[in-house]
Amino acid sequence: MRLSRARDLVIGQDALTRPAAPSDIRGRDRPDRAMKIVEAVADKYLRVLTAYDYDPAVAGHNPDSAMTLVVADREIVAADENVAALTFVAVDGGDLPAWQPGCHLDFHLPSGLRRQYSLCGDPADRGRYRIAVRSIPEGGGGSIEMHGLLPGTAVTVRGPRNGFPFVPTGSALFVAGGIGITPIIAMVRAARAAGIDWQFVYSGRSRESMPFLDEIETWESERVFVRPDDEFGRPTAGELLRRAPAGGAVYCCGPTPMLDAVRDRFADTGATALHFERFGAPTVLDGTPFEVELASTGEVLPVRADESALAVIRNRMPGVGYSCQQGFCGTCRVHVLSGTPEHRETRLTRQEQEDEMLICVSRSVGGRLTLDL
Ligand code: FES
């Protein structure tokens, strides 16, 4: 499966301002005017925290150091044959660095592309890592290259890192969309093992496109809702969040529209924390149009208010480097030769920001940026 790695966002709700009652079972707006006022107050106190930090002491390994891993097994895990589960082992067959549900690996592919994938195997099995890759023909080529890796192929890997940590206490709702199942399946297994109260909603285009259904359909049916779009229609945020536990947490991984919808409606639930990880680029908010000039050719590209510089540049330069599309991996870093960037990331230092930018999220408030591309 392909995951453009993301950071974990935690949206916590001040428990004292949250209504104790669960949301409408059909996910409808509460008509109660007093409730709307409570929600407005709650919204005011929404905290958005970013968690980038990784504690090497937990893993016993520096995630920035490169490892060479070898593909030991490749298995098709969705009926449409577009999702391959890949198992990797160390060259010497030894133990691999420890990981927890939510961790991902950075893959440096033979072509030079970098991509990030969630671990979805068994953390107790120190001898192997497992990921799943959906082949996306209209993507940047990384998923196709990953999907086609054959046993015996060596790849360079960094990690594991955890930008989407799971805490197996209390109660939790897990929401997965499509290939977003990969971090979630490891979390649900951990929740089952820990004996916490959990619910799981898994959506996708069709059953044929949804990996790991063989395993998931052996889980407690009263806790699992598998809802393919071709059987139930596209899910609304209310449907996805209907099982959110009062006072509990929601963990969500899926495409950007799903995450945006869940974020928008999370305040309508009685849950107190939302953890999510997206794949794909985030929606551009509050953008203004600007221009990018490619120094190598002199070509000037207009960037609309609702698109990223990376998306525009990729149309002209398909090989331009990128990975997370979230502004944290640094792969898309470029030198700015002229113009003033509007930095929308926290990866670069202030000094670096003086002449560099991350083109996946950073932009300009107008005018033209000349980039060393
Ligand atoms: S692609 Fe990761 S920071 Fe831009």
Image (cartoon, rainbow, N blue to C red):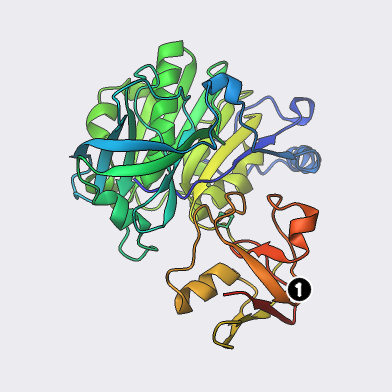
Foreground of the two, 102 or 227: 102
Q: Position of residue 286 (x, y in %)?
A: 71, 66
Q: Position of residue 355 (x, y in %)?
A: 74, 66
The quarter of the picture where the N terminus appears is top left
- Binning the other alpha carbons within 10 Å of mark 1 as few (below 14), some (14 to 19) or many (20 upward) gives some
Label count reads 1
Quadrant of the image occupied by residue 366: bottom right
* For residue 179, above or below residue 257: above
Foreground of the two, 113 or 258: 113
Residue under label 1: 365
**Left or right of 84, for residue 301:** right
- Residue at left offset 57%, top offset 57%: 282
- Residue at left offset 24%, top offset 44%: 153
**Left or right of 348, for residue 116:** left
Quadrant of the image occupied by residue 31: top right
Q: Position of residue 332 (x, y in %)?
A: 56, 61
Q: Position of residue 148 (x, y in %)?
A: 23, 51
Q: Quadrant of ligand 1?
A: bottom right
- Residue at left offset 31%, top offset 50%: 146
Foreground of the two, 83 or 96: 96
The quarter of the picture where the C terminus appears is bottom right
Residue at the farthest front position? 92
* For residue 234, above or below residue 197: below
Foreground of the two, 118 or 22: 118
Q: Residue type at mark 1?
A: Val
